[in-house]
Amino acid sequence: MIPAWLWLLCFSIPQVTLETGDGKVLWGPQPVIVHVKDENDQVPQFSQAIYRVQLSQGTKPGVPFFFLEASDADAPGTANSDLRFHILSQSPAQPSSDMFQLEPQQGALALSPEGSTSLDHALEGPYQLLVQVKDMGDQASGHQATATIEISIVQNTWVSLEPIHLAENLKVLYPHPIAQVHWSGGNVHYHLESQPPGPFDVDAEGKLYVTMELDREAQAEFLLLVRAQNSHGEDYAQPLEFRVVVTDENDNAPVCPQRGPSISIPELSPPGTEVTQLLAEDADAPGSPNSHVVYQLLSPEPKEGAEGKAFELDPASGSVTLGPALLQAGQHILLQVLAIDLAGAEEGLSSLCEVAIVITDINNHAPEFTTSQIGPVSLPEDVEPGTVVTTLMATDADLDPAFRLMEFAIESGDKEGIFALDWEPDSGHVQLKLHKNLSYEAAPYHKVVVVVQNVEELVGPGPGPEATATVTVLVEKVMPPPKLDQESYEASVPISTPAGSLLLTIQPSEPMNRTLRFSLVNDSKGWLCIEEVSGEVHTAQSLQGAQPGDTYTVLVEAQDTDEPRLSTSAALVVHFLNAPPAPALTLAPMPARYLCTPRQDYGVVVSGLSEDPDLASVPGPYNFALGPNPTVQRDWRLQPLNGSHAYLTLALHWVEPGEHEVPVVVSRNVQTWQLLVQVIVCRCNVEGECMRKVGHMKGMPTKLMAMGTLLGTLAAIGFFLILIFTHLALARKKDLDQPADSMPLKVAV
Ligand SMILES: *[C@@H]1O[C@H](CO)[C@@H](O)[C@H](O)[C@H]1NC(C)=O
Ligand SMILES: *[C@@H]1O[C@H](CO)[C@@H](O)[C@H](O)[C@H]1NC(C)=O
Ligand SMILES: *[C@@H]1O[C@H](CO)[C@@H](O)[C@H](O)[C@H]1NC(C)=O
Ligand SMILES: *[C@@H]1O[C@H](CO)[C@@H](O)[C@H](O)[C@H]1NC(C)=O
């Protein structure tokens, strides 16, 4: 401690002046700094002589529960004021003499480990501690003072609490006290921690508060840690832990599951088939009525008259199954289910859940033909392959286009593959087509059985009889129309030709295994007639009104006798001639020929070739016809051989033997002339030849005899001829229209 005068000296800064006796200043004034040295002349002092302190059981050893305070008036920072604390004595010294420890520099009083252990077992005390404070630091010397600390031991009230149940959404004034903790020792500061951080607080008295409404759904439980600490923030004991449980209130309605895409249920699914399970979530406390959700089916309601419901709902599980009522493919249903918490109680919260359901089609319908019997369809056997025989139609009652796709097959009746089927993949039409040529001979009719089936596999009973259709096809025989040996026919006749003269014979082109019936279509003049079966064309009457040089065209029709539809026609052009032309007279005589009777199978070749240059130069084929004399026509037959020759045979079985002159009308283009073919008919011998013995007959004599006979005969004939020609010339002049058969033009020798 510095004395007061020195204080004055120090702070009224002294000045030094050197002056003479008469007061004359010799030096100065100069300021003088005086350093005063502290001396440990002051004694440390406790703030109180007696301290009264409460110590709680359970205080951890080493944690200071009391801090001594003492002061020293000596200069701070010097050893003179460097204080040290010591426990001088403890009373009672039970159960240990070292119950406490005192930190020498700070004066912090704490329980020693022994003290802590023994205090936990029994409530001892109170204790009196005599404590000393001394200056001069750790030196042995120095001033000192003493004080007494009375320590009363109090029971430990630092006990854990039961969990606190706090209702969520509590409507009270906040902060709202919820609990109280108490550290019975003195000098306590409370500190609170919440895990997770929550709206909790503790005040200086150890009262715990909740500062705002809680939401169980946000945080259902908190762990609170409350610490009792000394002024240095050190825990006296383990922190108290206790749980805050937020109790539930039914403040959450069930939440329906997200409405997803429609649930597909195949049609005809059996009752009991699981459709869906609704799981409405309720955020309220699990296991409590607040989250006990039950379900109630609102829609669809059972239809009137329907047998039972379409859907069944289990109220507890929310499982939806199919009921006994039938649902139809393609139906769209919106299922409405009420989810109610509080187990469905009236005050429960609810939500309307919706589930879309669509009934999908299954392939339970087989395709069926609209007609099971088709035809008979008549087809000519010459129709071309590819021709559509018939079109069959099939339908399928399924909805799904994939279940309506059909395929067709020929099941039977077409072993040869004559028919084929053709269809568009997505249509119910199938065409039965011809694939190969039909043949009436091979099969006059066909019964083709066509089946239809789905491309997709059929569900349920198999296809019925309607999946089969029978097409009956009748094959019509086709015969080619008859064909004649010429495309058109020509004949030349003198206008004097009498009725009944054969003009020509119309013949089929080749021998056919069918008979023809011939007729004339437009013989408007009625001049001609045709033999219905043989095809021989004759004059029907005298050609009254025909002019020489004219032509007359008649259409000849040939019909198949069995199939009158089949016919052909050809034009027959008849050239009318004036009279047998004169040049015919100039023709060389035909040598006589021999034929024997009864008729043999040989004849006489007649040549149309002429040496007359006028006639030979005419172009075209030769036509031959027997002269118009009916007897000649009856007895003889003339058949064309080739373009220039014809063949003359006996027409009757028996012709009177003797010399015959057979008139043959030859025509070529518009030229016509007549030949008289001399034929000697004799009796046949056994070889079918003329008999030799007929010597006196102008038959087949020996060569010499024949020569003589011939010469004689020639002379006679020559004479005859002269007579005839003379007569003819005269007659010609008289009547040009005289019938040809009465006009022997020429006698062949
Ligand atoms: C089918 O008939 C046509 C004419 O009728 C004929 O040209 C064709 O060769 C025939 N085809 C077969 C394979 O017989
Ligand atoms: C002609 O046809 C008939 C039946 O139509 C038949 O009996 C006969 O054998 C056939 N003849 C010939 C040569 O084809
Ligand atoms: C008969 O018919 C054919 C072909 O139509 C024709 O050329 C001819 O002039 C007709 N004949 C008569 C006499 O009408
Ligand atoms: C026609 O037949 C006769 C007799 O057989 C023959 O001499 C003549 O050469 C034949 N003419 C033609 C053009 O074939």
Image (cartoon, rainbow, N blue to C red):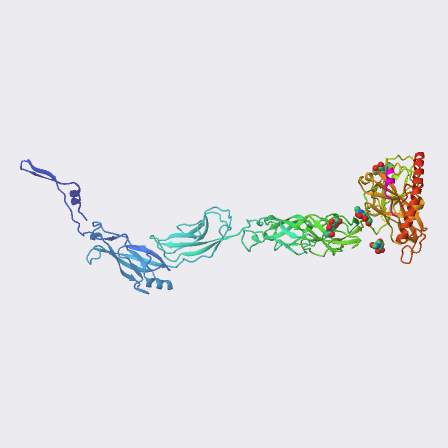
| Position in image of residue 544 (x %, y %) | 92, 36
On whether residue 584 falls in the magenta region, the answer is yes
Of residue 340 and residue 200, the one placed in the foreground of this image is 340
- Is residue 305 visible to us here? no
In the displayed structure image, the side of residue 629 where residue 436 appears, left or right: left
Front residue of this view, candidates 260 and 553: 553
**Location of residue 725 by image quarter:** top right
Q: Is residue 542 left or right of residue 68?
A: right
Q: Position of residue 195 (x, y in %)?
A: 44, 53
Q: Residue shown at 16%/49% (left/top)?
A: 37
Q: How many marks?
A: 0
**Magenta segment range?**
581-591
Residue 32's place in the image compared with 92, above or below, is above
Q: Quadrant of ligand 3?
A: top right
Residue 680: image location, x then y, percent: 91, 50
Choose between 698 and 35: the one closer to the eye: 698
Find the residue positioned furthest to the left: 21
Queried whether the magenta region covers residue 335, the answer comes back as no
